[in-house]
Image (spheres, grey):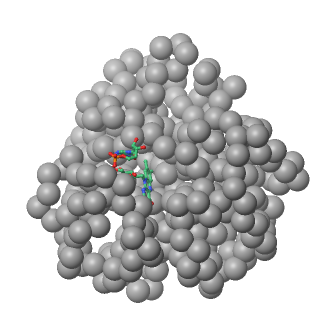
Amino acid sequence: MTYKEELCIDAGSENCPCLLAESGDCITCSRLQGKDCCDCNWRGVCIYNEYIQNGKKINNRRTNRKTKILKKIWYGDDLVVLVVQVSKGFALKASRPGSYVFLKKCGQSDCYSVPISVMRSEPEKGAIHLAIKVVAGKTKDLAAAEGELEIRGVYRNGLLGVSGIFTKKPQKVLCITKGIGFAPAANYNRWAYGKDTVDMIIDPDKINQELVNDYLADCPVNSIRYMELSPDFICPQDYDVVLLLASDYFLRSIYIPEDRKVCSNNFHMCCGEGICGACTMVDSEGKSHKMCKCQMEQF
Ligand SMILES: Cc1cc2nc3c(=O)[nH]c(=O)nc-3n(C[C@H](O)[C@H](O)[C@H](O)COP(=O)(O)OP(=O)(O)OC[C@H]3O[C@@H](n4cnc5c(N)ncnc54)[C@H](O)[C@@H]3O)c2cc1C
C-alpha cells in the first residue's frame, strides 16, 4: 500500500511531546527527528518549541494505575463487562470515539496488558465500561480480576480514519459491527447522539444480544439491522461515513471508499507509545509506521 500522509493522533494533545520526542523519533516534527529544518505539516502548537522550552519534558506520560472494579457483569460464558472507577477527567477523555485503555490484573507483568476499547464513559460518575471477550492468556487473566485492576490510558488510536467523524456538521453514518467491534461502536454512538443519524448493522455472532440492548438503550440508533456479515457484503452508498468495526478479514474484503471509511485499528498493541514495535506496519515503500499512534491517509 502507498500512503499520502502520516498523522500522529497524540500531536498537540496533553500527551505531546511524548517519548518519541526524547528518542528523536517524533512522528510529526522534523526537528525532533534530527533534521536541521522545519518541514512538518502540523498546524497546531509547535512541538519542537514545546519540548525545548519545557526543558525537554515528556508531557503526561501514561502509567499503570490501580483502580476499583465497580461492577463485573457476565454476558454468557466468555464475555464480561467491567465497570471501573476513573477520574472525571479520565472519563471525559475516554468518551472520545476511538479511545482505548490497557488493562491487567494488579501486580501482573506488563506483557499481560490488554488493549480494550471504551464501550461507555460516564464522566459524571467517574466510570468507564469495558467489554472483554475472553479468548486466551491475557483476557482470561484479566477476566479473573476481582476488586481492583491496573489501568493505563487514555489512548486515542482505536479507530483509523477517525477524523471523518469529528465534524461539527451532522452526518448520516452507517456503523457495521461484528463481535466485540460493537464496543467502540457503542462509545461512538453515545458521543454522536443528537448530532449524527446512525444506522447500525450488527453481526450477532460472538456478541451477546442483551449487551447490545443494554448499551444502546439510552441512546437509541436510527435503525438496527442484524445480519451475518460476509466478504461479498455490498456496502450501501448513501452514507457520509461508514464505520467498519470488524476483523481484518472483513476490513480487507468489504469495499468502502477511503474518504468515507473509519475502521477498527486491529494492529497488535503492546506499549501504545510507539516504542515496543508490536504494532509496526511496513508499507510498500519500506517505511515503517507505528500504528498505535499513526493515522494514515491512503492513496
Ligand atoms: C485498539 C484495540 C481495542 C480492542 N478492544 C477490545 C475490546 O473492547 N474488547 C476485547 O475483548 N478485545 C479488544 N481488543 C482485542 C484484544 O486486545 C485481544 O483480543 C486480546 O489482546 C487477546 O489476548 P489473549 O491473550 O486473550 O488472546 P491471544 O490468543 O493472544 O489473541 C487472540 C486474538 O487477539 C489478537 N491479539 C493478541 N494480542 C493482542 C494485542 N496486544 N493487541 C491486539 N490484538 C491482540 C490476536 O492476534 C488474536 O487474533 C482490542 C484490540 C485493540 C488493538
Question: Does 252 sit above or below residue 70?
Answer: above
Question: Dividing the image into 4 quarters, which one contains the N terminus?
Answer: top right
Question: Dividing the image into 4 quarters, which one contains the C terminus?
Answer: top right
Q: Position of residue 296 (x, y in %)?
A: 57, 34
Closer-to-camera residue (108/48): 108
Question: Does 208 sit above or below residue 299?
Answer: below
Residue at 39%, 40% (x, y): give it: 268
Residue at 54%, 31% (x, y): give it: 6
Residue at 31%, 58% (x, y): give it: 139
Q: Position of residue 252 (x, y in %)?
A: 64, 35
Apparent side of residue 208 relative to residue 82 in the rendered image (left or right):
right
Q: Which residue is outermost to the top?
A: 285
Q: Position of residue 261 (x, y in %)?
A: 70, 45
Closer-to-camera residue (58/46): 58
Closer-to-camera residue (137/104): 137
Occupied quadrant, residue 19:
top left
Occupied quadrant, residue 174:
bottom right
Q: Which residue is outermost to the front?
A: 77
Closer-to-camera residue (164/55): 164
Q: Position of residue 253 (x, y in %)?
A: 68, 36
Occupied quadrant, residue 199:
bottom right
Question: Does 86 sit above or below residue 116?
Answer: below
The number of numbered badges drawn on the structure is: 0
